[in-house]
Image (cartoon, grey):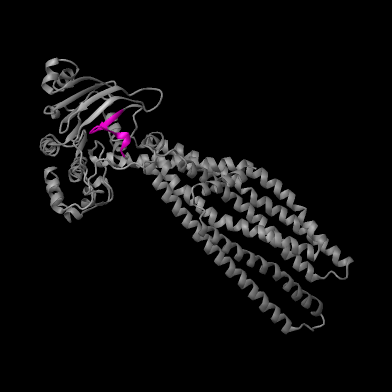
Amino acid sequence: MKSKKYTVDMVSGLKAQGEIKKGFVIALIVSSLLMIGSVVCQIIAPSILKELTNEIAYNALSHSIDIDFIIEKALILILIYALVAVSSYVSSYVMTTISQLLSMRLRTKITKKINDVPLSYFDSHQFGDILSRLTNDVDQIGQSLQQSVSMIVQSALLIIGVLIAMFVTSWQMALTTLISVPFMAVFLIIVTKFAMPQFRARQETLGDVNAVVEEDYNGQLVIKCFNAEEKVKADFERSNQALKNAMFKAQCFGGLMQPLVSFISYVAYAAVFVVGGLLVVNDPAFSYGIITEFMIYVNLFQSPLSQIAQAMNTMQMAAASSSRVFSFLNEKELEDESDKKYVFKDENGKEQVKGQVEFKNVCFSYDDSREIIHNFSAKISPGMKVAIVGPTGAGKTTLVNLLMRFYEVTSGEILIDGVSSKDMPREEMHDIFGMVLQDTWLFRGTIKENLVYNTKDVEQETIDKACKEANIAHYIKTLPGGYNYMLEDESSVSGGQKQLMTIARAMIKDAPLLILDEATSNVDTRTEEKIQEAMDRMTKGRTSFVIAHRLSTIKNADLILVMRNGNIVEQGTHDQLMAQNGFYASLYNSQFSFE
Protein backbone atom coordinates (compact mmCIF):
# COMPACT_ATOMS: atom_id res chain seq x y z
CA MET A 1 0.00 0.00 0.00
CA LYS A 2 1.61 3.24 -1.19
CA SER A 3 0.44 5.48 1.65
CA LYS A 4 2.09 3.15 4.15
CA LYS A 5 5.29 3.24 2.09
CA TYR A 6 5.29 7.05 2.02
CA THR A 7 4.58 7.24 5.76
CA VAL A 8 7.44 4.84 6.45
CA ASP A 9 9.64 6.96 4.14
CA MET A 10 8.69 10.04 6.15
CA VAL A 11 9.64 8.39 9.45
CA SER A 12 12.85 7.03 7.90
CA GLY A 13 13.63 10.50 6.63
CA LEU A 14 13.15 11.97 10.09
CA LYS A 15 15.44 9.33 11.57
CA ALA A 16 18.07 9.86 8.89
CA GLN A 17 18.07 13.59 9.54
CA GLY A 18 18.45 13.00 13.30
CA GLU A 19 15.14 14.67 14.13
CA ILE A 20 13.75 11.87 16.32
CA LYS A 21 15.62 12.73 19.49
CA LYS A 22 15.46 11.09 22.93
CA GLY A 23 13.40 14.00 24.26
CA PHE A 24 10.89 13.53 21.45
CA VAL A 25 10.56 9.83 22.28
CA ILE A 26 9.93 10.63 25.96
CA ALA A 27 7.34 13.24 25.01
CA LEU A 28 5.65 10.73 22.70
CA ILE A 29 5.54 8.16 25.53
CA VAL A 30 3.95 10.74 27.86
CA SER A 31 1.43 11.68 25.19
CA SER A 32 0.65 7.98 24.57
CA LEU A 33 0.10 7.34 28.28
CA LEU A 34 -2.33 10.25 28.42
CA MET A 35 -4.11 8.85 25.37
CA ILE A 36 -4.38 5.44 27.04
CA GLY A 37 -5.88 7.10 30.13
CA SER A 38 -8.38 8.95 27.95
CA VAL A 39 -9.32 5.71 26.13
CA VAL A 40 -9.83 3.82 29.40
CA CYS A 41 -12.11 6.58 30.69
CA GLN A 42 -14.16 6.57 27.48
CA ILE A 43 -14.60 2.78 27.69
CA ILE A 44 -15.66 2.87 31.36
CA ALA A 45 -18.24 5.62 30.82
CA PRO A 46 -20.78 3.52 28.82
CA SER A 47 -21.03 0.92 31.60
CA ILE A 48 -21.99 3.73 34.03
CA LEU A 49 -24.50 4.99 31.49
CA LYS A 50 -25.94 1.45 31.21
CA GLU A 51 -26.73 1.45 34.94
CA LEU A 52 -28.39 4.86 34.62
CA THR A 53 -30.48 3.67 31.66
CA ASN A 54 -31.63 0.51 33.42
CA GLU A 55 -32.54 2.46 36.59
CA ILE A 56 -34.68 4.84 34.58
CA ALA A 57 -36.13 2.29 32.13
CA TYR A 58 -37.30 -0.24 34.71
CA ASN A 59 -38.39 2.12 37.51
CA ALA A 60 -39.87 5.04 35.58
CA LEU A 61 -43.36 3.57 35.36
CA SER A 62 -43.47 2.70 39.08
CA HIS A 63 -42.09 6.13 40.03
CA SER A 64 -39.46 4.44 42.21
CA ILE A 65 -36.30 5.89 40.59
CA ASP A 66 -33.43 6.20 43.03
CA ILE A 67 -32.50 9.88 42.63
CA ASP A 68 -29.40 9.57 44.83
CA PHE A 69 -28.20 6.72 42.62
CA ILE A 70 -28.83 8.84 39.50
CA ILE A 71 -26.95 11.83 40.96
CA GLU A 72 -24.05 9.64 42.05
CA LYS A 73 -23.67 8.03 38.62
CA ALA A 74 -24.10 11.40 36.87
CA LEU A 75 -21.29 12.92 38.95
CA ILE A 76 -19.08 9.94 38.17
CA LEU A 77 -19.79 10.41 34.46
CA ILE A 78 -18.98 14.12 34.67
CA LEU A 79 -15.69 13.31 36.43
CA ILE A 80 -14.80 10.66 33.85
CA TYR A 81 -15.48 12.95 30.87
CA ALA A 82 -13.60 15.77 32.60
CA LEU A 83 -10.59 13.43 32.84
CA VAL A 84 -11.02 12.62 29.15
CA ALA A 85 -11.03 16.33 28.27
CA VAL A 86 -7.95 17.12 30.40
CA SER A 87 -6.02 14.09 29.09
CA SER A 88 -6.87 14.96 25.48
CA TYR A 89 -5.85 18.59 25.95
CA VAL A 90 -2.51 17.79 27.62
CA SER A 91 -1.77 15.11 25.02
CA SER A 92 -2.60 17.57 22.23
CA TYR A 93 -0.39 20.19 23.90
CA VAL A 94 2.54 17.78 24.02
CA MET A 95 2.09 16.78 20.36
CA THR A 96 1.81 20.44 19.31
CA THR A 97 5.07 21.19 21.12
CA ILE A 98 6.79 18.23 19.43
CA SER A 99 5.50 19.13 15.97
CA GLN A 100 6.51 22.79 16.25
CA LEU A 101 9.97 21.90 17.54
CA LEU A 102 10.35 19.44 14.68
CA SER A 103 9.21 22.05 12.15
CA MET A 104 11.70 24.52 13.59
CA ARG A 105 14.52 21.96 13.35
CA LEU A 106 13.61 21.10 9.76
CA ARG A 107 13.56 24.78 8.76
CA THR A 108 16.95 25.21 10.45
CA LYS A 109 18.33 22.20 8.59
CA ILE A 110 17.01 23.44 5.26
CA THR A 111 18.51 26.88 5.85
CA LYS A 112 21.86 25.29 6.73
CA LYS A 113 21.56 22.98 3.74
CA ILE A 114 21.11 25.98 1.43
CA ASN A 115 24.58 27.12 2.49
CA ASP A 116 26.05 23.63 2.14
CA VAL A 117 24.86 22.63 -1.32
CA PRO A 118 27.08 23.65 -4.26
CA LEU A 119 26.10 26.61 -6.42
CA SER A 120 25.44 24.19 -9.27
CA TYR A 121 22.26 23.10 -7.44
CA PHE A 122 20.79 26.58 -7.79
CA ASP A 123 21.59 26.56 -11.50
CA SER A 124 18.95 23.88 -12.00
CA HIS A 125 16.34 24.73 -9.33
CA GLN A 126 14.06 27.72 -8.93
CA PHE A 127 14.36 29.75 -5.74
CA GLY A 128 10.59 29.83 -5.29
CA ASP A 129 10.42 26.02 -5.23
CA ILE A 130 13.12 25.90 -2.52
CA LEU A 131 11.20 28.51 -0.51
CA SER A 132 8.05 26.42 -0.86
CA ARG A 133 9.86 23.45 0.67
CA LEU A 134 11.04 25.66 3.53
CA THR A 135 7.55 27.01 4.27
CA ASN A 136 4.59 25.07 2.87
CA ASP A 137 6.08 21.57 2.94
CA VAL A 138 7.58 21.90 6.43
CA ASP A 139 4.29 23.34 7.74
CA GLN A 140 2.42 20.41 6.22
CA ILE A 141 4.71 17.93 8.00
CA GLY A 142 4.28 19.80 11.30
CA GLN A 143 0.49 19.89 11.01
CA SER A 144 0.41 16.20 10.20
CA LEU A 145 2.43 15.28 13.26
CA GLN A 146 0.35 17.61 15.42
CA GLN A 147 -3.04 16.38 14.26
CA SER A 148 -2.84 13.12 12.36
CA VAL A 149 -0.27 11.13 14.35
CA SER A 150 -1.97 11.75 17.70
CA MET A 151 -5.36 11.11 16.09
CA ILE A 152 -4.21 7.80 14.57
CA VAL A 153 -2.57 6.61 17.79
CA GLN A 154 -5.56 7.54 19.94
CA SER A 155 -7.99 6.05 17.44
CA ALA A 156 -6.04 2.79 17.27
CA LEU A 157 -6.00 2.51 21.06
CA LEU A 158 -9.70 3.31 21.21
CA ILE A 159 -10.57 0.70 18.57
CA ILE A 160 -8.69 -2.02 20.47
CA GLY A 161 -10.26 -1.07 23.80
CA VAL A 162 -13.77 -0.78 22.38
CA LEU A 163 -13.52 -4.11 20.58
CA ILE A 164 -12.69 -5.82 23.85
CA ALA A 165 -15.55 -4.03 25.62
CA MET A 166 -18.03 -4.90 22.83
CA PHE A 167 -17.23 -8.61 22.94
CA VAL A 168 -17.51 -8.60 26.73
CA THR A 169 -20.91 -6.85 26.46
CA SER A 170 -22.42 -8.82 23.56
CA TRP A 171 -20.48 -10.97 21.15
CA GLN A 172 -23.45 -11.14 18.77
CA MET A 173 -23.65 -7.36 18.28
CA ALA A 174 -19.84 -7.14 18.24
CA LEU A 175 -19.68 -9.51 15.27
CA THR A 176 -22.45 -7.50 13.57
CA THR A 177 -20.37 -4.33 13.95
CA LEU A 178 -17.20 -5.99 12.62
CA ILE A 179 -18.93 -6.89 9.34
CA SER A 180 -18.47 -3.25 8.29
CA VAL A 181 -14.68 -3.22 8.86
CA PRO A 182 -13.59 -5.11 5.68
CA PHE A 183 -15.70 -2.78 3.53
CA MET A 184 -14.06 0.25 5.13
CA ALA A 185 -10.58 -1.22 4.65
CA VAL A 186 -11.21 -1.91 0.95
CA PHE A 187 -12.52 1.62 0.35
CA LEU A 188 -9.56 3.16 2.21
CA ILE A 189 -7.03 1.17 0.16
CA ILE A 190 -8.68 2.08 -3.14
CA VAL A 191 -9.06 5.78 -2.33
CA THR A 192 -5.53 6.05 -0.96
CA LYS A 193 -4.07 4.44 -4.08
CA PHE A 194 -5.65 7.10 -6.30
CA ALA A 195 -5.27 10.03 -3.89
CA MET A 196 -1.55 9.80 -3.10
CA PRO A 197 -0.25 10.77 -6.58
CA GLN A 198 -2.64 13.73 -6.57
CA PHE A 199 -1.30 14.98 -3.23
CA ARG A 200 2.26 14.71 -4.52
CA ALA A 201 1.31 16.60 -7.68
CA ARG A 202 -0.37 19.25 -5.54
CA GLN A 203 2.77 19.97 -3.49
CA GLU A 204 4.99 20.02 -6.59
CA THR A 205 2.61 22.36 -8.41
CA LEU A 206 2.45 24.59 -5.33
CA GLY A 207 6.24 24.84 -5.49
CA ASP A 208 6.00 25.84 -9.16
CA VAL A 209 3.47 28.58 -8.38
CA ASN A 210 5.69 29.95 -5.61
CA ALA A 211 8.61 29.97 -8.03
CA VAL A 212 6.57 31.95 -10.58
CA VAL A 213 5.44 34.46 -7.92
CA GLU A 214 9.01 34.92 -6.65
CA GLU A 215 10.31 35.40 -10.17
CA ASP A 216 7.60 37.92 -11.06
CA TYR A 217 8.14 39.85 -7.83
CA ASN A 218 11.87 40.21 -8.44
CA GLY A 219 11.34 41.14 -12.08
CA GLN A 220 8.74 43.89 -11.63
CA LEU A 221 10.90 46.62 -13.16
CA VAL A 222 11.59 44.57 -16.29
CA ILE A 223 7.95 43.48 -16.54
CA LYS A 224 6.71 47.07 -16.45
CA CYS A 225 9.49 48.30 -18.73
CA PHE A 226 8.46 45.87 -21.47
CA ASN A 227 4.69 46.16 -20.82
CA ALA A 228 4.67 42.43 -20.17
CA GLU A 229 1.97 42.49 -17.52
CA GLU A 230 -0.47 40.54 -19.68
CA LYS A 231 2.13 37.91 -20.55
CA VAL A 232 3.12 37.52 -16.89
CA LYS A 233 -0.53 37.33 -15.92
CA ALA A 234 -1.14 34.64 -18.55
CA ASP A 235 1.90 32.64 -17.35
CA PHE A 236 0.71 32.86 -13.76
CA GLU A 237 -2.82 31.88 -14.73
CA ARG A 238 -1.46 28.72 -16.37
CA SER A 239 0.45 27.79 -13.21
CA ASN A 240 -2.47 28.81 -11.02
CA GLN A 241 -4.88 26.75 -13.12
CA ALA A 242 -2.57 23.74 -12.86
CA LEU A 243 -2.49 24.19 -9.07
CA LYS A 244 -6.26 24.48 -8.94
CA ASN A 245 -6.67 21.26 -10.95
CA ALA A 246 -4.13 19.42 -8.80
CA MET A 247 -5.75 20.60 -5.56
CA PHE A 248 -9.22 19.82 -6.88
CA LYS A 249 -8.26 16.25 -7.80
CA ALA A 250 -6.44 15.75 -4.49
CA GLN A 251 -9.41 17.00 -2.45
CA CYS A 252 -11.91 15.05 -4.56
CA PHE A 253 -10.12 11.75 -3.98
CA GLY A 254 -9.29 12.59 -0.38
CA GLY A 255 -12.84 13.77 0.28
CA LEU A 256 -14.27 10.39 -0.67
CA MET A 257 -13.03 8.81 2.54
CA GLN A 258 -15.28 10.62 5.00
CA PRO A 259 -18.61 10.05 3.16
CA LEU A 260 -17.81 6.38 2.51
CA VAL A 261 -16.90 5.76 6.13
CA SER A 262 -20.03 7.61 7.31
CA PHE A 263 -22.26 5.57 4.97
CA ILE A 264 -20.86 2.29 6.22
CA SER A 265 -21.18 3.54 9.82
CA TYR A 266 -24.90 4.28 9.41
CA VAL A 267 -25.48 0.83 7.91
CA ALA A 268 -23.65 -0.67 10.91
CA TYR A 269 -25.88 1.33 13.31
CA ALA A 270 -29.00 -0.01 11.65
CA ALA A 271 -27.72 -3.60 11.77
CA VAL A 272 -26.81 -3.29 15.47
CA PHE A 273 -30.27 -1.89 16.30
CA VAL A 274 -31.95 -4.83 14.55
CA VAL A 275 -29.78 -7.44 16.31
CA GLY A 276 -30.16 -5.65 19.66
CA GLY A 277 -33.95 -5.57 19.29
CA LEU A 278 -34.06 -9.29 18.55
CA LEU A 279 -31.88 -10.02 21.60
CA VAL A 280 -34.13 -7.95 23.91
CA VAL A 281 -37.17 -9.89 22.69
CA ASN A 282 -35.60 -13.35 22.90
CA ASP A 283 -33.24 -12.99 25.90
CA PRO A 284 -34.76 -11.75 29.21
CA ALA A 285 -31.24 -11.03 30.58
CA PHE A 286 -30.58 -8.61 27.73
CA SER A 287 -31.61 -5.12 28.95
CA TYR A 288 -32.22 -1.73 27.35
CA GLY A 289 -29.14 -0.47 29.19
CA ILE A 290 -26.98 -2.95 27.31
CA ILE A 291 -28.30 -1.60 23.99
CA THR A 292 -27.56 1.96 25.12
CA GLU A 293 -24.07 0.93 26.28
CA PHE A 294 -23.41 -0.91 23.05
CA MET A 295 -24.57 1.96 20.83
CA ILE A 296 -22.04 4.20 22.55
CA TYR A 297 -19.40 1.54 21.91
CA VAL A 298 -20.43 1.40 18.25
CA ASN A 299 -20.10 5.17 18.03
CA LEU A 300 -16.70 4.96 19.78
CA PHE A 301 -15.70 2.25 17.31
CA GLN A 302 -16.92 3.96 14.16
CA SER A 303 -15.68 7.41 15.10
CA PRO A 304 -11.99 6.38 15.22
CA LEU A 305 -12.35 4.73 11.83
CA SER A 306 -13.72 7.99 10.46
CA GLN A 307 -10.90 9.92 12.15
CA ILE A 308 -8.31 7.56 10.71
CA ALA A 309 -9.79 8.13 7.26
CA GLN A 310 -9.54 11.88 7.79
CA ALA A 311 -6.00 11.56 9.18
CA MET A 312 -4.97 9.51 6.16
CA ASN A 313 -5.71 12.54 3.96
CA THR A 314 -3.41 14.72 6.04
CA MET A 315 -0.77 12.00 6.25
CA GLN A 316 -0.75 11.65 2.48
CA MET A 317 -0.18 15.38 2.07
CA ALA A 318 2.55 15.20 4.71
CA ALA A 319 4.14 12.22 2.96
CA ALA A 320 4.18 14.15 -0.30
CA SER A 321 5.70 17.16 1.47
CA SER A 322 8.25 15.06 3.34
CA SER A 323 9.50 13.48 0.11
CA ARG A 324 10.22 16.99 -1.23
CA VAL A 325 11.86 18.17 2.02
CA PHE A 326 14.03 15.11 2.50
CA SER A 327 15.01 14.93 -1.18
CA PHE A 328 16.46 18.42 -0.72
CA LEU A 329 18.11 17.53 2.60
CA ASN A 330 19.68 14.49 0.93
CA GLU A 331 21.18 16.53 -1.91
CA LYS A 332 24.92 16.19 -2.35
CA GLU A 333 26.76 18.75 -0.24
CA LEU A 334 30.06 20.51 -0.66
CA GLU A 335 33.02 18.42 0.42
CA ASP A 336 33.55 18.40 4.19
CA GLU A 337 36.69 20.39 4.88
CA SER A 338 36.60 20.42 8.68
CA ASP A 339 39.94 18.56 8.75
CA LYS A 340 41.68 21.23 6.65
CA LYS A 341 43.54 23.92 8.54
CA TYR A 342 43.96 27.54 7.53
CA VAL A 343 47.26 27.92 5.69
CA PHE A 344 47.96 31.65 5.79
CA LYS A 345 46.48 32.85 9.09
CA ASP A 346 48.91 34.22 11.68
CA GLU A 347 48.52 34.23 15.46
CA ASN A 348 46.35 37.37 15.30
CA GLY A 349 43.99 35.77 12.79
CA LYS A 350 45.25 37.97 9.93
CA GLU A 351 45.78 36.43 6.51
CA GLN A 352 49.47 36.64 5.55
CA VAL A 353 49.24 36.25 1.78
CA LYS A 354 51.86 37.54 -0.64
CA GLY A 355 49.47 37.36 -3.56
CA GLN A 356 51.08 35.06 -6.12
CA VAL A 357 48.40 33.28 -8.13
CA GLU A 358 48.95 30.58 -10.71
CA PHE A 359 46.52 28.78 -12.96
CA LYS A 360 48.09 25.49 -14.01
CA ASN A 361 46.44 23.60 -16.89
CA VAL A 362 42.94 24.41 -15.62
CA CYS A 363 39.99 22.79 -17.39
CA PHE A 364 36.35 23.19 -16.38
CA SER A 365 32.86 22.27 -17.57
CA TYR A 366 29.50 22.84 -15.88
CA ASP A 367 28.33 19.50 -17.26
CA ASP A 368 29.54 16.80 -19.60
CA SER A 369 28.06 18.44 -22.69
CA ARG A 370 30.51 21.33 -23.11
CA GLU A 371 33.89 22.37 -21.70
CA ILE A 372 34.06 26.07 -20.81
CA ILE A 373 37.73 26.50 -19.84
CA HIS A 374 40.34 24.66 -21.91
CA ASN A 375 43.79 23.95 -20.44
CA PHE A 376 44.13 27.48 -19.02
CA SER A 377 47.53 28.48 -17.59
CA ALA A 378 48.75 31.84 -16.26
CA LYS A 379 51.07 33.06 -13.53
CA ILE A 380 50.38 36.33 -11.68
CA SER A 381 53.03 37.91 -9.48
CA PRO A 382 52.17 39.53 -6.11
CA GLY A 383 50.68 43.00 -6.32
CA MET A 384 49.80 42.79 -10.01
CA LYS A 385 46.58 44.25 -11.36
CA VAL A 386 45.26 41.66 -13.78
CA ALA A 387 42.47 42.51 -16.20
CA ILE A 388 40.41 39.72 -17.74
CA VAL A 389 38.70 40.76 -20.97
CA GLY A 390 36.89 39.09 -23.78
CA PRO A 391 33.49 38.83 -25.45
CA THR A 392 30.38 37.62 -23.63
CA GLY A 393 30.57 33.89 -22.90
CA ALA A 394 34.37 33.75 -23.15
CA GLY A 395 34.65 32.37 -19.61
CA LYS A 396 35.70 35.46 -17.64
CA THR A 397 33.24 35.13 -14.75
CA THR A 398 33.67 31.35 -14.76
CA LEU A 399 37.39 31.87 -14.22
CA VAL A 400 36.68 34.05 -11.18
CA ASN A 401 34.19 31.50 -9.83
CA LEU A 402 36.90 28.86 -10.02
CA LEU A 403 39.35 31.17 -8.28
CA MET A 404 36.89 31.63 -5.39
CA ARG A 405 36.12 27.88 -5.38
CA PHE A 406 32.44 28.52 -6.02
CA TYR A 407 32.98 25.67 -8.49
CA GLU A 408 35.73 23.05 -8.52
CA VAL A 409 38.06 22.70 -11.50
CA THR A 410 37.56 19.60 -13.62
CA SER A 411 41.32 19.14 -13.96
CA GLY A 412 44.45 21.11 -13.23
CA GLU A 413 44.86 23.32 -10.16
CA ILE A 414 44.94 26.89 -8.90
CA LEU A 415 47.83 27.87 -6.63
CA ILE A 416 47.95 30.70 -4.08
CA ASP A 417 51.53 31.44 -3.01
CA GLY A 418 52.41 27.97 -4.21
CA VAL A 419 49.62 26.25 -2.22
CA SER A 420 46.88 24.46 -4.15
CA SER A 421 43.44 25.89 -3.46
CA LYS A 422 42.22 22.31 -2.98
CA ASP A 423 44.49 22.04 0.08
CA MET A 424 42.94 25.13 1.67
CA PRO A 425 39.55 25.37 3.37
CA ARG A 426 36.95 26.95 1.15
CA GLU A 427 36.31 29.54 3.88
CA GLU A 428 39.95 30.67 3.75
CA MET A 429 39.70 31.23 0.00
CA HIS A 430 36.70 33.47 0.64
CA ASP A 431 38.55 35.28 3.44
CA ILE A 432 41.61 36.19 1.39
CA PHE A 433 39.54 37.63 -1.44
CA GLY A 434 37.49 40.79 -1.44
CA MET A 435 34.87 40.75 -4.17
CA VAL A 436 32.62 43.25 -5.91
CA LEU A 437 30.11 41.62 -8.24
CA GLN A 438 28.22 43.06 -11.16
CA ASP A 439 25.02 41.87 -9.45
CA THR A 440 24.71 43.89 -6.26
CA TRP A 441 23.08 42.56 -3.11
CA LEU A 442 21.77 44.45 -0.10
CA PHE A 443 19.70 42.95 2.70
CA ARG A 444 17.09 44.32 5.09
CA GLY A 445 19.05 46.21 7.75
CA THR A 446 20.81 49.49 8.39
CA ILE A 447 23.31 51.03 5.99
CA LYS A 448 26.08 50.26 8.48
CA GLU A 449 25.04 46.62 8.82
CA ASN A 450 25.18 46.28 5.05
CA LEU A 451 28.61 47.91 4.85
CA VAL A 452 30.32 45.86 7.58
CA TYR A 453 28.57 42.63 6.57
CA ASN A 454 30.27 39.76 8.44
CA THR A 455 33.45 41.82 9.02
CA LYS A 456 34.37 41.85 12.71
CA ASP A 457 35.52 44.76 14.88
CA VAL A 458 35.29 47.53 12.28
CA GLU A 459 35.97 51.03 13.57
CA GLN A 460 33.79 53.93 12.45
CA GLU A 461 36.86 55.71 11.05
CA THR A 462 37.45 52.78 8.68
CA ILE A 463 33.82 52.89 7.52
CA ASP A 464 33.97 56.66 6.93
CA LYS A 465 37.18 56.35 4.94
CA ALA A 466 35.86 53.53 2.75
CA CYS A 467 32.60 55.35 2.05
CA LYS A 468 34.47 58.53 1.17
CA GLU A 469 36.76 56.67 -1.24
CA ALA A 470 33.77 54.87 -2.75
CA ASN A 471 32.01 58.22 -3.26
CA ILE A 472 28.99 57.18 -1.20
CA ALA A 473 29.65 59.16 2.02
CA HIS A 474 27.71 62.25 0.91
CA TYR A 475 24.66 60.21 -0.06
CA ILE A 476 24.63 58.39 3.30
CA LYS A 477 24.79 61.70 5.19
CA THR A 478 21.65 62.92 3.37
CA LEU A 479 19.64 59.92 4.64
CA PRO A 480 17.60 60.17 7.88
CA GLY A 481 19.83 58.65 10.54
CA GLY A 482 22.84 58.38 8.25
CA TYR A 483 24.52 55.01 8.78
CA ASN A 484 21.54 53.90 10.91
CA TYR A 485 19.08 54.40 8.05
CA MET A 486 17.06 51.20 7.66
CA LEU A 487 16.92 49.64 4.19
CA GLU A 488 13.52 47.98 4.02
CA ASP A 489 13.68 47.24 0.30
CA GLU A 490 16.43 47.32 -2.30
CA SER A 491 14.18 49.39 -4.55
CA SER A 492 14.62 52.33 -2.18
CA VAL A 493 18.25 52.60 -3.35
CA SER A 494 19.28 53.18 -6.96
CA GLY A 495 21.40 50.67 -8.83
CA GLY A 496 24.42 52.98 -8.82
CA GLN A 497 24.14 53.62 -5.09
CA LYS A 498 23.91 49.91 -4.42
CA GLN A 499 27.03 49.40 -6.50
CA LEU A 500 28.88 52.06 -4.51
CA MET A 501 27.84 50.45 -1.24
CA THR A 502 29.12 47.04 -2.33
CA ILE A 503 32.42 48.66 -3.36
CA ALA A 504 32.66 50.28 0.07
CA ARG A 505 31.86 46.89 1.63
CA ALA A 506 34.84 45.33 -0.20
CA MET A 507 37.09 48.20 0.91
CA ILE A 508 36.07 47.68 4.54
CA LYS A 509 36.85 43.96 4.35
CA ASP A 510 40.45 44.89 3.39
CA ALA A 511 41.27 41.46 1.94
CA PRO A 512 44.77 40.79 0.54
CA LEU A 513 43.41 39.85 -2.91
CA LEU A 514 40.62 41.50 -4.86
CA ILE A 515 38.14 40.52 -7.54
CA LEU A 516 36.20 43.22 -9.34
CA ASP A 517 33.61 41.78 -11.69
CA GLU A 518 32.51 44.76 -13.79
CA ALA A 519 32.34 46.73 -10.55
CA THR A 520 31.55 50.09 -12.14
CA SER A 521 28.85 48.90 -14.52
CA ASN A 522 26.03 50.69 -12.70
CA VAL A 523 27.56 54.14 -12.21
CA ASP A 524 27.79 57.18 -14.44
CA THR A 525 30.97 58.20 -16.26
CA ARG A 526 31.94 60.94 -13.78
CA THR A 527 31.41 58.67 -10.77
CA GLU A 528 33.24 55.91 -12.61
CA GLU A 529 36.35 58.08 -12.80
CA LYS A 530 36.25 58.68 -9.05
CA ILE A 531 35.64 55.00 -8.42
CA GLN A 532 38.58 54.11 -10.64
CA GLU A 533 40.79 56.38 -8.54
CA ALA A 534 39.52 54.68 -5.38
CA MET A 535 40.03 51.28 -6.99
CA ASP A 536 43.60 52.17 -7.90
CA ARG A 537 44.26 53.10 -4.28
CA MET A 538 42.54 49.95 -3.04
CA THR A 539 44.39 47.62 -5.45
CA LYS A 540 47.79 49.17 -4.82
CA GLY A 541 50.06 46.53 -3.31
CA ARG A 542 47.36 43.84 -3.71
CA THR A 543 46.92 41.21 -6.37
CA SER A 544 43.67 42.08 -8.07
CA PHE A 545 41.57 40.62 -10.85
CA VAL A 546 39.38 42.99 -12.82
CA ILE A 547 36.74 41.81 -15.27
CA ALA A 548 35.86 44.66 -17.59
CA HIS A 549 33.87 45.23 -20.74
CA ARG A 550 34.81 48.90 -21.01
CA LEU A 551 38.43 48.39 -21.91
CA SER A 552 39.30 52.03 -21.33
CA THR A 553 39.05 51.37 -17.58
CA ILE A 554 41.86 48.78 -17.51
CA LYS A 555 44.52 50.49 -19.62
CA ASN A 556 46.77 50.77 -16.55
CA ALA A 557 46.57 47.03 -15.72
CA ASP A 558 49.91 45.25 -15.20
CA LEU A 559 48.65 42.26 -17.18
CA ILE A 560 45.69 41.84 -19.48
CA LEU A 561 44.43 38.33 -20.17
CA VAL A 562 42.36 38.18 -23.34
CA MET A 563 39.93 35.27 -23.34
CA ARG A 564 38.04 33.77 -26.22
CA ASN A 565 36.01 30.55 -26.11
CA GLY A 566 37.61 29.51 -22.80
CA ASN A 567 41.19 30.04 -23.94
CA ILE A 568 43.74 32.82 -23.36
CA VAL A 569 44.43 33.99 -26.87
CA GLU A 570 46.57 37.00 -25.92
CA GLN A 571 48.24 38.42 -22.82
CA GLY A 572 50.33 41.47 -22.03
CA THR A 573 50.01 45.16 -21.20
CA HIS A 574 47.64 47.47 -23.02
CA ASP A 575 50.41 48.96 -25.14
CA GLN A 576 51.85 45.55 -25.99
CA LEU A 577 48.49 44.17 -27.04
CA MET A 578 47.63 47.23 -29.10
CA ALA A 579 50.99 46.93 -30.86
CA GLN A 580 50.16 43.32 -31.78
CA ASN A 581 47.03 44.59 -33.55
CA GLY A 582 45.26 41.33 -32.74
CA PHE A 583 41.99 40.35 -31.08
CA TYR A 584 42.40 42.73 -28.12
CA ALA A 585 43.09 45.66 -30.43
CA SER A 586 39.96 44.74 -32.37
CA LEU A 587 37.90 44.69 -29.15
CA TYR A 588 39.37 47.97 -27.95
CA ASN A 589 38.88 49.82 -31.23
CA SER A 590 35.32 48.52 -31.58
CA GLN A 591 34.35 50.68 -28.58
CA PHE A 592 35.14 53.81 -30.52
CA SER A 593 33.82 52.83 -33.96
CA PHE A 594 30.61 54.29 -35.30
CA GLU A 595 28.68 53.29 -38.33
Task: Please state the extent of the stretch shown in magenta in the rendering.
Answer: 413-424
Q: Residue at x 74, y 71 (%)?
A: 47
One can see residue 78 in this view: yes
Q: Quadrant of residue 543?
A: top left
Residue 514 at x, y percent in the picture: 20, 37
Foreground residue among 497 and 288: 497
The answer to whether residue 54 is left or right of residue 549 is: right
Q: Quadrant of the N terminus?
A: top right
Q: Quadrant of the C terminus?
A: top left
The verdict on residue 491 being magenta is: no
Q: Quadrant of residue 520?
A: top left
Foreground residue among 470 and 422: 422
Residue 375 at x, y percent in the picture: 30, 21
Residue 361 at x, y percent in the picture: 29, 23
From this view, report whether residue 301 is shown above or below residue 349. below
Q: Residue at x 18, y 21 (%)?
A: 571
One can see residue 227 in this view: no
From this view, report whether residue 583 is shown above or below residue 464. above
The answer to whether residue 516 is left or right of residue 104 is: left
